[in-house]
Image (cartoon, rainbow, N blue to C red):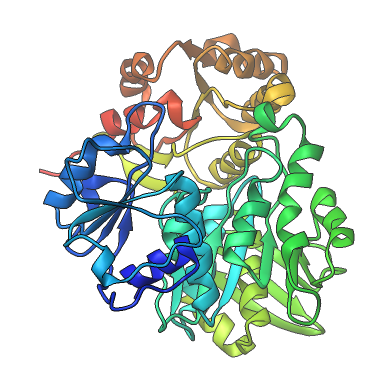
Amino acid sequence: MLNLADVIEALTGTRPAGVNSLLTESFIDSRLCIPGSMFIAIPGERTDGHQFVGAAFQKGAVVALVQQELNSQYPTVKVSSGMVLSAADLPALPFCIQIENTVLALQKIARFWRSKMDLRVIGITGSVGKSTTKELVTDVLSYKYRTLKNPGNLNNEIGLPLSILRLGPGYERAVLEMGFYVPGEIALLCEIARPQVGVVTNIGTVHAERAGSQDVIALGKSELVQSLPSAPDGTAILNFDDPRVMWMKEKTTARVLTYGLNPKADIWADHVEGEGLEGIRFTLHHHGEEYPLRVPLIGQHSVHTALRAAAVAFTEGMSWDEIIIALRHSHTQLRLVAVYTEVGALVLDDTYNASPESTLAALNLLEELDGRKIAALGDMLELGQYEQEGHELVGARAAQFAAELVTIGTRGRIIARAAHEAGMSDGNIHSFDTAADSVEYLRKTLKKGDVLLVKGSHSMRMDLIVNALEKQNE
């Protein structure tokens, strides 16, 4: 468990004598602090963590990292690289440690703590499927190893270091999702986490507005495989079915293990069958061996997620018998959730976020299910130069099998126009400005046996539709 001496050694380079206080957890949200924890005060766009140091101490935090003077309100010790401290130089707990930059300090502490951990780290990145892959990989590895994952969306320059600080000597594996907006970000995360295994899911258009293009996104994601140790110590697990991912093979000195639906991949699948909400069936192949599988993942596109988890587990020394058992009995919680309305219509709640790639996959799942199919689709944001094309692709696909299309937002109208041009009747297309505006129409039109897909970017608040329609248990 991280202790106060570790924090000071990471920040100064010298371990303080006589300092032994253990730190239970580390937080940037004072509301989450628990007795014995460390609070990191980070200035944000909307609020400044320095305003909540007192609240953190009231919750039981014993030390706070700050970068601003707090008017002597709390005992404070200023530290910098090269300082030599001992217990006699420190105030009584709780107190503040003042450094130049709290985010950089957090990263420095995480880097130090990772260096003390004898474990293997699996890094996961890609445009779509990172979180589900992280969950399933963790599930499968946990069959044999004590495994840590970064919770929720703690996958950036703040969240990933916080996750690393949760590591203790008992952990054998860490599975860390790595987010991306612009080149250089994943390189930083890898420099902190030091992964030995890197998994790349795919290269899509999400975040293209900030990154610029899919090629730039691919370059940024490739920082994961570039950071890996050379073979045989490092392994890059690459999607054979995505040319931009396979391009990364030339960017790494690690061993390369490929997965996909092509028999040329090292680990591949065929006979993929969707069973609706019951999961998927497929046959997994590896070096002439084949393993029939049924896994509780929704949608045929989820076969890639299962292959990634199998590839990681194989790399980490699990036998195929262990891998198959772990996959069959996984309890990975997918972001897509199925709920029912008062009249008995099925609602596929996929409202966490949206990109053209993930929306097309969700539409493919909708096609697998029985019943009259309705798609409620909102704006997909941060697509940059791919905005028009991405929304048009989704509209054309929805027109192929949806009986009705409901669109939300200004970009949603691009989906509507594309669906009309693909042959969907105007009478079956309904456009609204906001999610809330569409609820009454959907409530009136849904009947028992209907299937409604609800999907859009997080800020479109498509969850309001699901919340309004879901049957409430008395």
The answer to whether residue 459 is above or below residue 84 is above
Dividing the image into 4 quarters, which one contains the C terminus? top left
| Residue 143 picture location, percent across and down | 47, 82
The answer to whether residue 466 is above or below residue 243 is above
Decide if residue 248 is on the left or right side of residue 293.
right
Give the total number of marks visible in the rendering: 0
- State the image quarter where residue 71 is shown: top left
The answer to whether residue 31 is above or below residue 95 is above
Of 178 and 20, nearer the camera is 20
- State the image quarter where residue 440 is shown: top left
| Residue 62 picture location, percent across and down | 21, 59
Residue 98 in sight in this render = yes
The answer to whether residue 259 is above or below residue 27 is below
| Residue 372 picture location, percent across and down | 48, 33
Of 191 and 216, nearer the camera is 191
Decide if residue 183 is on the left or right side of residue 153.
right
Q: Residue at x 58, y 10 (%)?
A: 426
Dividing the image into 4 quarters, which one contains the N terminus? bottom left
Decide if residue 31 is on the left or right side of residue 67.
left
Q: Residue at x 84, y 69 (%)?
A: 253
| Residue 181 picture location, percent across and down | 63, 38
Of 188 and 18, nearer the camera is 18
Residue 297 in sight in this render = no
